[in-house]
Image (cartoon, helix red, strand yellow):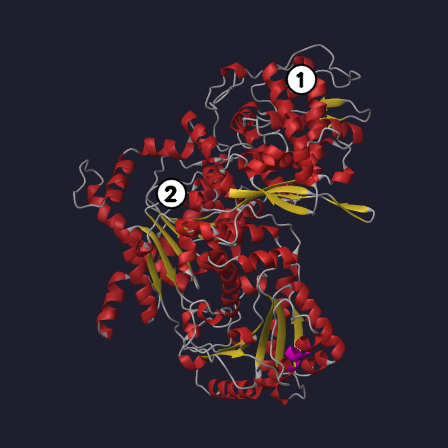
Amino acid sequence: MGVEAKEEQWKQKFPAFPYKPYSIQLDFMNSLYQFLDNGGISMLESPTGTGKTLSIICSALQWVVDRKNQQKPNLGNSCPSDDEPDWMREFVVNKENPVQEKKKIGVKSKKFTEANRRTGGVGDLFGNESGIGKNERVEKGGNGEGNDGKLLNDDDEFLVEEYESEQEEEEGGVCKRKGSISSSSDEDEEDKLDGEEEGLKVFFCSRTHSQLSQFIKELNKTVFGSELKVVSLGSRKNLCINQEVLKIGNPASINERCLELHNSKKNGGSKIKKLEPGGSVRRTKASAGCPMLRKQKLQKDFVSDVSQQEALDIEDLVDLGSRLGTCPYYGSRRMVPAADLVVLPYQSLLSKASRESLGINLKNNIIIIDEAHNLADSLIGMYDAKISLSQLENLHQCLENYLEKFRSRLGSGNRRYIQILMILTRAFMQAIFNEDETNDNVTSNAVDRATKGPNESSVTINDFLFALNIDNINFVKLINYVKESNIIHKVSGYGDKVTCLEKQIPGDSISKEGGSTLSGFRALLDMLLSLTNKNVDGRIIVSKLRSKGLSEQDGFIKYVMLTGEKIFSEIVNQAHAVVLAGGTLQPIEETRERLFPWLPSESLHFFSCGHIIPPESILPVAVSSGPSGLSFDFSYASRSSPKMIEELGLMLCNLVSVVPEGIVVFFSSFDYKDKVYGVWRTSGILNRITKKKRLFREPRSSSDIEGVLKEYKDTIDMLSNKALSESKTSLNGAVLLAVVGGKISEGINFSDGMGRCIVMAGLPYPSPSDIELIERIKHMEGIGDTKFTNTLQVSNNDTYNGGNLNSGFDILRRCKRRGKEYYENLCMKAVNQSIGRAIRHINDYAAILLVDSRYVSDPIKRSSSHTASKLPQWIQDRLISSTSNYGEVHRLLHQFFKINKNKVR
């Protein structure tokens, strides 16, 4: 196709693109448009700096506009054309029956509750009830047992409704309290706009709020930012404007407090208890919930204001909500049904519980997941569950106090299930205690085997249940009981009240104390739900209570999900199309095997494009040796050698003279970065470096990063200013020491002078002392063709002790297939993310130094498993894969920067 024809095609097909697109951008948009036509799963790879986000916006949203325009003539036709695709006919039917569709989104029926139970959803566990004052029996008269009369009548509100266990169905059916009402979402129908119907929409998600804000900025460069209905969703922590709630700090506690206030508003207010000076309790008048939700008119004003402006990001929504005095979190949620584009973080879309809470309907819609290079690990990480020893001890004590207080007034069903919860918390505590730290004489040999030995160990679900002698408990029925009975709020409320009375805590602190107890119950329920998974889907990790001098390190039990196939299939089966986008998605086969193995390789739509920059604007070099001739080897056994660290320092001393402006050096970990810095300071190398460039280090605290980056950039800008050339300073830029996998390597753009040279020190393989990593590697080794099963050298039954490097390396050495490849891919994905920070636009230029002899290869003989073959194709194509000595590297750098500096840009 000629240039003129391509330009004409662009104007007709993607008129929203604000500039004349590069050829690769046009190819990208055409491919995405075609993939959306076809439906199913597709993967699109476009290097950072190639306008990927803008291409996604203009292609995907143009597709939505075109589909809606095609659909308009059929809105009043009950018999859509036969040549329409199935997904569109179903969409039209849903449009004609919005009541039925709305029921799917908003109201949770008995059928939904049962399905939710089977799939492990926990979205309504902490949101259906206010915790106090809903369907309660308040009995007048009578003293509570063991009390001095001051708590007269006030304790009755904590008495759980009678639970009729004889009504339980054989298959774990829904069990009810007397007088209970059917479960509902934690949100009212008032949280949705009246009369709004679901329409075809795009859900765009990325990893961080900052990435989503950048997406909104790109969106507003096009007409779609103002012409389409766009809504940004975020967490309560990011959108809350109630300062009293924000003071809590902890995200989980903020969620709980927000739900408590929201539900007290729905239920007409909850009675708040205050402590009198003598310790007695009095009640105040009902609270009307969160003050930011008291006026529905303001919520409607919020929605109206958002609709009349161009697309807003999270910060914009917070500013608007603050000006109006109404909640931006619930205001933005009201807009979801009517939106054409919903912008939201990973968790909100990929977590089933979050989708249910937000009322998100994926049916026949488009899902675009950006930054999808680590999607599988991110997805399964959302379904991990963890509970600590301190949480278990608190819950056990609360349950014990509650049972002692109300034993004579509880029905047999309630007593039985409370006792089961106590048995479980006690069993979990036994698993965490070390053998010499427990006085329990009834611990079985099986439990001894599970709790002896190292600080961390892993077992299957079945082995864990058998070892603790809790394999006879019906977890499905127990989870149903917790959902239906409201027991967690009753026990938490009573326990927090007792704590407040004992410690004379003011009444307004009750909610904060309650948050910690509710968080413990949340963790317990997550763990119970995890125990209903298949035995092969995950592993239980037990970290023992450890003594460190006079202090103890809290132990914990954690469930680690190993497979994302079932989770991802729930998303794929609903959506018309799922698009995975990123700068580097290779190897795509690993992603397919882990997330959608049912899809044949030939049925996966895949597109990859090159880079927009000319070949002479990038210089990737594999550096095998340093200035003194020492071979670079940053493997685990050699990288801490003072000679190796000094050789790297000598190379940097040379780089600061030949590289203008900014140099970013990536290390494998914070500990190693600090070790290198210490050796350089002692040897005098640091002084030599800082004579030419100021040196900065990535801080461990993410809150300090912005300040360091600003100072780094300001230093480079100031020293690059030609007006300063007359000054006598010898400084010519700055050096930033960063960490692979840190904040800087993932989300910061080092365009232009901020990143003229990227130095990757070694291959940042993750430590095999990480027990969760080893479990994932073992799982990956077993994935794939069953004909290899009998020849595997590693199985899930192999024991591994956390923190033991030798055990970890032994398992890695025995991996011959996918486990080994997964471990290597983890390393190279991290490398690719880091080195991709430098080139951000067509006029940018940078050198990339891969410093380790393991990067060196013969491009002709290079195998698919070699390290260099896992680099992005646009880097492989230009990689100088070997040099005779460091002098050659230095000459290449000198020539590269001389050519690019003299270019007219």
Residue with the mark numbered 2: 362
Q: Identify the residue at the far top of this view.
A: 141
What residue is shown at x 32% (from left), y 46% (from top)?
A: 576
Left or right of 642, for residue 380? left
Q: Nearer the viewer, residue 809 or 700?
A: 809
Q: Earlier in the sequence, mark 1 or mark 2?
A: 1
Q: Which residues lie in the magenta part? A: 646-650
- x and y, in percent, of residue 506 in the image: 75, 32
Dividing the picture into quarters, in which one does residue 560 lie?
top right
Is residue 882 visible from the viewing direction of this image? yes
Q: Secondary structure at mark 1?
A: helix
Residue hosting label 1: 156
> Magenta: predominant secondary structure element?
helix
Q: Amino acid at mark 1?
A: Asp
Q: What is the crowding at mark 2: few (fewer than 14 residues within 10 Å), some, or many (at least 20)?
A: many
- Distance (Cα) linking label 1 and label 2: 43 Å
